[in-house]
Amino acid sequence: MQPTRPLSGSEPKPAGSDGAPWPGPDPTVAPVTIRTLQRAMRERKTFAALTCYDATTARWLERAGVPVLLVGDTAAEVILGHPNTLHAPMDFLVALTAAVRRGAPRALVMADMPFLSYQASDEEGVRNAGRFMTEGFADCVKLEVDASFAPLVARMSRAGIPVVAHIGSRPQHAKQAGGYSAAGKTATDAARIVADADAMLAAGATMLLVEATPVEVTEEIVSRSTVPVIGCGAGPACHGQVVVTHDLLGLTDRQPPFALPIVHLGKQIAEMAEAWKSKVRSGNLGEHPYALSDEQRAAFLAGIARREPRAGSQ
Ligand code: KIV
């Protein structure tokens, strides 16, 4: 983070991963676009995607070369502390999307459309999608759909809004389904999801995102798809893979088996907090960065001494 307060001594040092100052985004590196992902798909180079909800994390993920950042409605859970993804207000997600864009100017930023931002009417859906593009500076929007949403997806596509059609398990239906669950586990349901994929491709979806399906179902979708397919717990056949970053960071208490922690930041946060508590207790706060000059100190002390005592004080 660019420090907003003076550091003791020398110049602020925005650190890169090696502790060296980070020079900012490399102007010779082209931004990731839909075409970049289409090329990766053609060349069979699987790409990584991660959820992201803030500018600081976005900066680090972009530095690490993650091409796709999803501002997921999982923000309702990992940022706001709700038990499901139904509680992600539009304005909140638009603001987070803009923050991620500021932190990662070259990544492809995918904005998740929250519960009831597109289901009530197509017109409202198109306008809300437009907000993610114009106010959130997103590159595309993602919506949880089945074949019945084809007219909306077609309308968004006609308006120039790239749509990622999220099919398979749809967490915004968790209340109806009685909780989070995999999708496509019966022949009928599997065939329905493949039909959803076909309908989305016909409607002009720019990408598909398939969540929590058996590999046979995913493979069938990938084999029919003319656009990149991103999987979330959908097996290795997909062109890209996305998971919730907080799961990989070891910050969540429970993770799905396909997104187990890679690092354990939760423990490190606890260690940091313990260390800060003992610093505070011992008064060992480091060098104090602010000082008066001799001249200002003398003037200050003289001014204090001259002030009349307040009525009632000694
Ligand atoms: O909101 C989200 O984070 C998602 C991913 C889990 C795919 O939709």
Image (cartoon, helix red, strand yellow):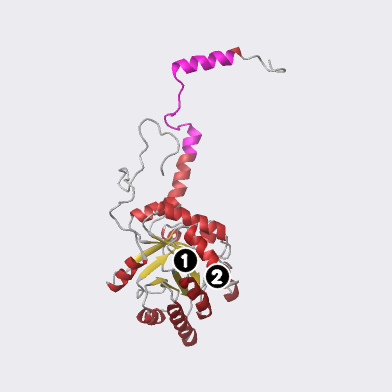
Name the spot of residue 221 as percent of width and height, x first: 40, 80
* Left or right placement of residue 132 versus residue 68 in this view: right
Name the spot of residue 70 as percent of width and height, x first: 44, 62
Three-letter amino acid code at the position of disc 1:
Val
Circle 1 or circle 2, nearest the eye: 1
Magenta span of residues: 277-305
As measured in the structure, the alpha-carbon distance from the residue carrying label 1 to the one carrying label 2 is 15 Å
The N terminus lies in quadrant: top left
Q: Which mark is residue 141?
A: 1
**Residue at the location (43% across, 82% down)?**
198
Closer-to-camera residue (299/249): 299
Closer-to-camera residue (234/89): 89
Few, some or many C-alpha atoms within 10 Å of disc 2 (few <14, some 14-19, many ≥20)? many
**Residue with the most extreme right position:** 312
**Residue with the most extreme front position:** 159
Q: Secondary structure at mark 1?
A: strand
Specify the quadrant of the image occupied by residue 289.
top left
Specify the quadrant of the image occupied by residue 123.
bottom right
